Image (cartoon, grey):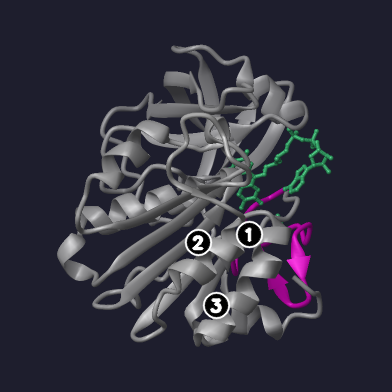
Amino acid sequence: MPDNCYVPIPMTVRSVRAESDDRTLRTFDLAFQESGRRFDYLPGQFCQLSLLGKGEAPFGIASSPTEEGFLRFTVNRVGTVTTALHYLDEGETVGLRGPLGNHYPVEKLKGQNVVIVSGGFAFTTLRSLVVYMLANREDYADISVIYGARRPGLMLYRDELAEWEKRSDLGLHLTIDKEAEGWDRQVGFVPAVTEQVAPSPDDAWAVVCGPPVMIKYTLPVLFKLGFPPERIYTSLERRMKCGVGKCGRCNIGSKYVCADGPVFSYAELQELPEQF
Ligand SMILES: Cc1cc2nc3c(=O)[nH]c(=O)nc-3n(C[C@H](O)[C@H](O)[C@H](O)COP(=O)(O)OP(=O)(O)OC[C@H]3O[C@@H](n4cnc5c(N)ncnc54)[C@H](O)[C@@H]3O)c2cc1C
Ligand code: FES
């Protein structure tokens, strides 16, 4: 972080590409304009991206700290800032504040089995986590990834998923909601596929990110399989302003999602006043 955490760091768009066939998702690789700048982060953290005259919004970091030279973000176009970001071309400048928030418990996961369950474009920071664990493969036991999208064209990072499918040290289970031409993997909703895959809870931790409905129906499956709430982690999204625990925009009870989160264990969430 710069000395003043409210001052954005100027970043250059190094590359940009459409991530989904409906063009609602775009992936940006950003590079620091200042050479040699240090930026220490871990999977699960996020940044505020800003464009002059448009505003600022939080986005999870999709790259892994083990990948040097760029920071990756995948942006779903929903409103003012995200639409403006979609118009960015290579070589243009975007402001960045971060890294913000906490991260997935990569230390606690060491030596343990890790089950990642995800749906839709929430897979961004989980890509960071998977790439990080694969780069430190000897630190982790079995890694399983269950990832679903409505249809193949909405699945993020498809080229990379194809590479992961070839690996023998990663169990990848891809699913789409309904049959589609040319799709020869699983079909069905993420909670049902999680039940079929039935990952063992022994020495295992689950990290679950996705649309609320997916999380709602996946949690009971994980509980039934024997995962306790303190071994299930998720990442929350809330509207934010400062991103550093000052403005009170993102609080849930006594917790600020931007500073105490966005990563929480389900046991922590059960202590909060709101239902998730
Ligand atoms: C920690 C964190 C990580 C995030 N990571 C990503 C990411 O990797 N990729 C990505 O595309 N998005 C991510 N988001 C969501 C993203 O911040 C919002 O989509 C963005 O702020 C919308 O800005 P906008 O100006 O385009 O939308 P606005 O014009 O402000 O609003 C458009 C619509 O989106 C809704 N909306 C705005 N912000 C949010 C929000 N935070 N949560 C739910 N609904 C919202 C509004 O209610 C409105 O309906 C993340 C949010 C958080 C808090
Ligand atoms: S966004 Fe300001 S306190 Fe969280």
Residue 258 numbered mark, or none: 1
Q: Left or right? Give the position of 237 relative to 93.
A: right
User: As displayed, is residue 122 above or below residue 21?
Assistant: below
Comes first in the chain, label 2 or label 1: 2
Residue 185, percent from left and from top: 43, 45
Q: What is the C-alpha distance between the residues marked 1 and 3?
A: 26 Å
Three-letter amino acid code at the position of disc 3: Leu
Residue 248 belongs to magenta span: yes
State which mark lies toward you, 1 or 3: 3
Residue at figure coordinates x 41%, y 74% from the top left: 199
Q: Which residue is mark 3?
A: 222
Q: Left or right? Give the position of 132 relative to 28.
A: left
- Neighbor class of circle 3 (other Cα within 10 Å; few <14, some 14-19, many 20+) is many
Q: Which residue is mark 2?
A: 117
Q: Left or right? Give the position of 74 relative to 108.
A: right
Residue 272 belongs to magenta span: no
Three-letter amino acid code at the position of disc 1: Cys
Q: In terms of image quadrants, where is residue 212? A: bottom right
Q: Are marks 2 and 3 in contact (CB under 8 Å)?
A: yes
Comes first in the chain, label 2 or label 3: 2
- Name the element at disc 3: helix
Mark 1, ligand 2, within 8 Å: the answer is yes
Residue range of the region highlighted in magenta in the rendering: 241-262
